[in-house]
Amino acid sequence: MPAFQDFYPENVAHCYGCGRLNGHGHQIKTHWDGDETVTRYTPRPEHTAVPGFVYGGLIASLIDCHSTGTAAAAAYRAENRAMDSLPPLRFVTGSLHVNYLKPTPLGPELELRGRVKEIKGRKVVIESEVRVNGVATARGEVVAVQMPDSFGR
């Protein structure tokens, strides 16, 4: 099944975190799992903060892109539309807040889980959590704003 990010129009599919057209980026893939969304990502050795632990900036970028992808999927779902329907709905970050709960070990796969907190007009608020082996290591909230049609042209 295609990921949310697979539906992003080419002119806005270059993001370092989630753009499928950015060969140097994370290229995360997000899917629905019931009413939650899930992304799985395995950090690479260069994502080190201190030996054995993941750099916090990577965690923030994963929460950011997981949440904006979730916002897009939620907006389509709220309109009872398929993600490949036109006009495309794409979201950017209005605000990002991350709480680091405990150090995130480098090595195991990270699981991000997202939930829609609010949809109001062109704004979607997403709560996301990073887990390692079922243990929460970070939580974030993203206010995602629908991208204007002129953005990315």
Image: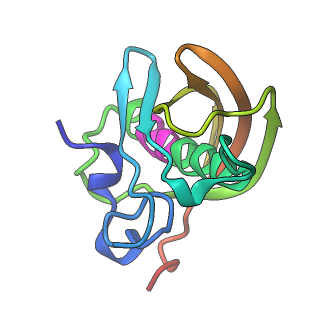
Q: Classify residue 18 as left or right of residue 141.
A: left
From the top left corner, tell me how far across and down residue 46 is, in percent.
56, 61
Q: Classify residue 80 as left or right of residue 70.
A: left
From the top left corner, tell me how far across and down residue 87 is, in percent.
33, 60
Q: Find the magenta span and give its range.
A: 69-75
- Relative to 88, say whether 38 is above or below: above
Give the quarter of the figure containing the N terminus.
top left
From the top left corner, tell me how far across and down residue 144 is, in percent.
64, 49
From the top left corner, tell me how far across and down residue 121 is, in percent.
62, 44
- The residue positioned 55% from the left and 69% from the top of the image is 148
| Nearer to us in this view, 47 or 22 | 47
Q: Residue furthest left?
A: 1
Q: Quadrant of residue 12?
A: bottom left
- Relative to 123, say whether 135 is above or below: above
Give the quarter of the figure containing the C terminus.
bottom left
Q: Quadrant of residue 30?
A: top left
| Nearer to us in this view, 34 or 81 | 34
Q: Classify residue 79 as left or right of residue 137.
A: left
Q: Residue furthest front?
A: 51
Q: Main secondary structure of the magenta part?
A: helix
| Nearer to us in this view, 26 or 2 | 26
Q: Classify residue 25 as left or right of residue 46.
A: left
Is 123 inside the magenta-drawn segment? no
Q: Residue furthest bottom?
A: 153
- The residue positioned 52% from the left and 54% from the top of the image is 45
